[in-house]
């Protein structure tokens, strides 16, 4: 698979660069997605090593990382937005791109199904049900790898003073408060539908709700080590209910970091 991986790396690099633009805002978005792809791929490789996966499965995780967001580039080309709600689900769009690439036919049928399943489910609120444990494993890997880097991408825009610098494609409404239904979900330790985000406060608290969807202790430890959780908490408008959610979250994080996998 080494030769195939090299071909895939070469193709994705050229493909992403083909979307470079003289429009400063468009170029900013493309560069963010290009860098994100690299970091997520590295996260997949590290997670595979942590999980002691075979060489074959480690390479499969790498392929999934490389192509998990390939749909983002066509999405922006067609719709001029990275917002799935205003265009097309970028994971589903990415699978259309993948199905046009002949080199994916060199994967076994089983591996191809795993790649499709993991990429299709990397951005969904919940992973679709299946009895195939390998599909679930790779979906969990890419979901963790993706979230870990999204925290890095969004970190610079947490402070209110930097809100105006946030690119339009990741910007929320200007209000800093948190919608009551998002607070309710947070206190209960539930996930929220990010497509229903109405304010910048909603956008921030959703990042804390993602914590309950982190699958591996390795990922949680990285999130803690990099200070992402505390930085988000420091940027939130906090009342008694939000504090209850924070207390519950921090207890959950501590337990997850100590998980034996």
Image (cartoon, rainbow, N blue to C red):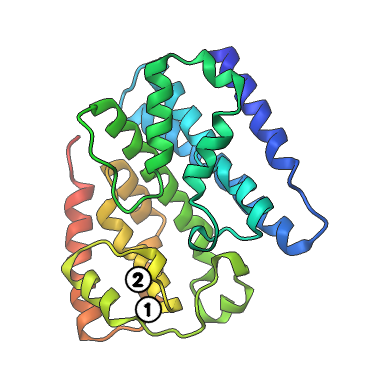
Q: Residue 258's spot in the image, x, y percent?
A: 18, 46
Q: Residue 1's spot in the image, x, y percent?
A: 52, 13
Q: Which labelled disc corresponds to residue 134? A: none
Q: Quadrant of residue 229?
A: bottom left
Q: Residues within 10 Å of mark 1 (few under 14, many from 20)?
A: many
Q: Nearer the viewer, residue 97 or 65?
A: 97
Name the outermost residue toward the right: 22
Query: Contact (CB < 8 A) between labels 1 and 2?
Result: yes
Question: Which quadrant, please, contains the C terminus?
Answer: top left
Look at mark 2 in the image and give the residue it sits on.
Answer: 205
Element type at mark 2: helix
Q: Residue 192's spot in the image, x, y percent?
A: 30, 65
Look at mark 1 in the image and give the residue it sits on.
Answer: 236
84 to 156, vertically: above or below: above
Cα–Cα span, label 1 and label 2: 7 Å
User: Which residue is drawn at the image coordinates 29% and 44% (left, top)?
Assistant: 127
192 to 1, vertically: above or below: below
Element type at mark 1: loop
């Amino acid at each position: 698979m080494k030769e195939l991986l090299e071909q895939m790396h070469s193709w994705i690099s050229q493909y992403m660069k083909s979307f470079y633009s003289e429009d400063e805002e468009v170029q900013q978005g493309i560069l963010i997605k290009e860098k994100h792809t690299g970091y997520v791929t590295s996260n997949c490789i590290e997670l595979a090593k942590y999980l002691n996966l075979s060489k074959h499965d480690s390479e499969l995780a790498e392929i999934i990382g490389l192509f998990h967001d390939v749909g983002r580039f066509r999405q922006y080309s067609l719709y001029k937005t990275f917002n799935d709600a205003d265009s097309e689900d970028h994971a589903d769009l990415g699978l259309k791109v993948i199905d046009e690439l002949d080199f994916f036919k060199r994967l076994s049928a089983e591996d191809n199904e795993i790649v499709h399943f993991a990429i299709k489910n990397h951005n969904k609120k919940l992973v679709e049900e299946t009895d195939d444990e390998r599909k679930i494993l790779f979906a969990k890997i890419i979901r963790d790898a993706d979230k870990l880097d999204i925290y890095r991408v969004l970190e610079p825009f947490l402070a209110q003073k930097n809100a105006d610098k946030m690119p339009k494609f990741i910007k929320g409404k200007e209000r800093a408060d948190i919608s009551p239904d998002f607070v309710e979900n947070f206190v209960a330790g539930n996930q929220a539908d990010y497509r229903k985000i109405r304010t910048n406060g909603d956008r921030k608290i959703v990042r804390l709700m993602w914590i309950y969807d982190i699958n591996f202790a390795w990922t949680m430890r990285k999130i803690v080590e990099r200070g992402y959780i505390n930085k988000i908490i420091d940027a939130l408008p906090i009342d008694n209910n939000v504090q209850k959610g924070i207390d519950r979250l921090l207890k959950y994080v501590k337990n997850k970091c100590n998980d034996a996998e």
